[in-house]
Image (spheres, rainbow, N blue to C red):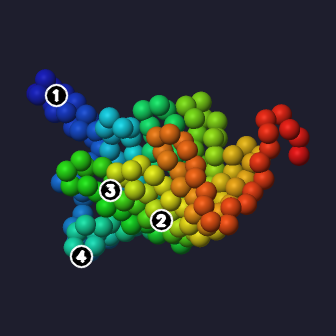
Amino acid sequence: MKRFLLPIFFLLFLSYQQGANLDSLPYSEGEKVENFSFSRSDELGEWKISGKIARLSPDQRKTSITEPRFKIKTKKGKILTLQTAEEGVAEFTIDEVTRRINSLTATKKVVIIQKDEKGEILFRSTSEKMVYDGKKRVIVLTGNPVVHQDKNEVRGKIIRFFIDTGKIIVTGNVRGTIFQEGEEE
């Protein structure tokens, strides 16, 4: 009996470690799921979406989450985390073919922090709205977006952050404070 149970436990453990897929989401249309969590790992890295409450849209294409938290870990070891204020909401869709996040939109005091593989903060941003495009792997911040990188601070109408390259593009009413390396305030 022990020989039979151990392989089953091991297979269950491995399938749990791989994260859920669309076919195994633990809810149906309109159902309220508390303490929601959904993750995936593939050749681009790992990601996890969690929140207080999740609901599937009537067309079963979007999931809405209250108090969302989103985490991406790239293959290079960089970790990007997102969360909103307590009253924040996020909606996301999953690509049915690749099983990756197709889009994620979060609102209400969105905070994004990116850390390197050693845990050092590379940048921190705040905005009222964030849209993640999973195909282009870009985050677009609007609603008074601000990016802090070391002592530097940049603001604009729209801030785009490219996850794979770390490139940040600020457009529209750009203003900020930039210090050269070694320069004192």
Which residue position holds label 1?
A: 7
Name, please, the residue furthest toward the top: 3
Which residue position holds label 3?
A: 102
Please say if the residues under marks 1 and 4 sit with CB atoms less than 8 Å apart: no
* Horizontal relation, residue 14 to residue 77: left or right: left
Q: Secondary structure at mark 4?
A: loop
* Residue drawn where x is 53% and y is 67% of the image: 129
* Horizontal relation, residue 12 to residue 73: left or right: left
Please say if the residues under marks 4 and 3 sit with CB atoms less than 8 Å apart: no
Which residue position holds label 2?
A: 106
* Residue drawn where x is 58% and y is 49% of the image: 168
Depth check, front residue: 70 or 31: 70
* Residue drawn where x is 38% and y is 38% of the image: 45
Residue type indicated by callout 1: Pro
C-alpha span from label 2 to label 3:
14 Å
Residue type indicated by callout 4: Pro
Dividing the picture into quadrants, the one containing residue 145 is: bottom right
Q: Secondary structure at mark 1?
A: helix
Please say if the residues under marks 2 and 4 sit with CB atoms less than 8 Å apart: no
* Horizontal relation, residue 62 to residue 3: left or right: right
Q: Quadrant of the N terminus?
A: top left
